[in-house]
Amino acid sequence: MIPNYALYGEEKDETFPDILHCESIASRSRQNNWMIAPHRHHTLHQFFTLETGGGVISIEDTSHLLKPPAVISMPPLTVHGFEFSQNTKGWVVTIPDLIMNEILIHASEVKSRLLKPAIMDGTEEVAFYFQRISEEHRQVKTGRNQLLAHLSGTLAVLISRNIVDLNTIKPMSKSKKHNHVQQFLDLLEQHFHTLHSVGDYASLLNLSTTHLTRNCRDITGKSTSDLIQDRLMLEAKRSLVYTKMPISEMAYFLGFNDPAHFSKFFHRRIGMSPSHFREKADLPN
């Protein structure tokens, strides 16, 4: 089974509540001998830039040579892996699909152009935004999240403009299994705060719960129930960190009949209460 990660190698996915993640290519690749085995992310979009070095990227069933300066756009659920040349330099920006949709809410054409994986030549303008995101991501200044949203939105627009047919990888035809999982994830995004049971989603898709769960495990490495709980946890964490919503109100908003039930659910997932998580979180706004 092809592994599904939050960030590469991190199978314990409790979903980072930050607006995005940025790290150097070397920070994760060096410890893996510059080899990143094929994997996928079911809720994350990634942008890569290679400044020096190079290597080979595998996307689904094809391989492509990477010659800097190069930029890669990798949508969720796409199987990809790397063999980097030693000491390759560049950046990886990882954006939750939920955040990407919010950032590009008025840019449907941009979103549609980013639905397929793509490789293109880098430009000085695009390199500038990768660098600014990396700098701002490390900061704790006022307005950090707003500026990161602005920078990543601009980066997404610039990359989408540079995507041309010759540089867009044609993915393999998606199986019914893959389509069912994508349909489930779309439904989950619409109804996560009201529908919590696997049976609800299976009924909407005209599938048995067993069939839906098997498809989810095969494509994402997680059960349908785990994916539902992950989405609830992501929303809970974002609300705890970025809003002052009372925890009892948050529980009802997320579809829990009893705030105590929500607190138990939250504690069971990460080992601390919602109030403790809110106190501990120190993300700048």
Image: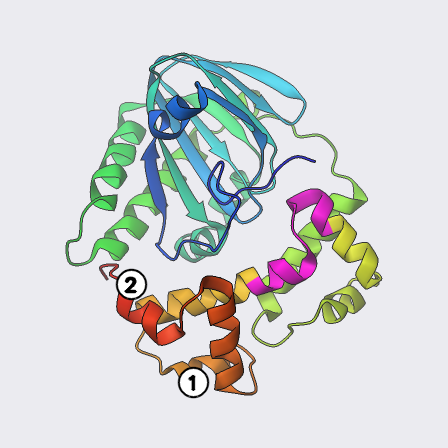
Give coordinates of residue 140: x percent, y percent. 17, 53
* Residue located 26% across and 56% down the image: 146
Mark found first going from the N terminus, 1 or 2: 1
- Secondary element at tag 2: loop
| 57 relative position to 206: left or right | left
Which sits in the foreground, 137 or 130? Answer: 137
Q: What secondary structure is the stretch in magenta mostly built from? A: helix
* Residue located 55% across and 44% down the image: 112
| Amino acid type, callout 2 | Ala
| 143 relative position to 83: left or right | left
Give coordinates of residue 190: x percent, y percent. 59, 67
Give coordinates of residue 70: x percent, y percent. 40, 20
Which sits in the foreground, 133 or 162? Answer: 133
Visible in this render: residue 252? Answer: no
Visible in this render: residue 237? Answer: yes
Can you tell which mark lies on residue 281?
Answer: 2
| Amino acid type, callout 1 | Glu
- Real-space Cα separation, disc 1 to disc 2, in angstroms: 19 Å
What residue would you read off at disc 1? 249
Q: How is the image coloured?
A: rainbow
Q: Tell me where the magenta segment starts and ends, as one range.
A: 216-229
Residue 74 versus residue 248 in the image, above or below: above
Give coordinates of residue 274: x percent, y percent. 39, 73
* Residue located 35% across and 80% down the image: 245
- The number of numbered badges drawn on the structure is 2
Q: Is residue 100 magenta?
A: no
Locate residue 165: give its quadrant: top right
Characterize the local packing of mark 2: few (<14), some (14-19) or many (20 or more) Cα atoms within 10 angstroms. Answer: some
Residue 196 versus residue 152 in the image, above or below: below
Residue furthest left as drawn? 141
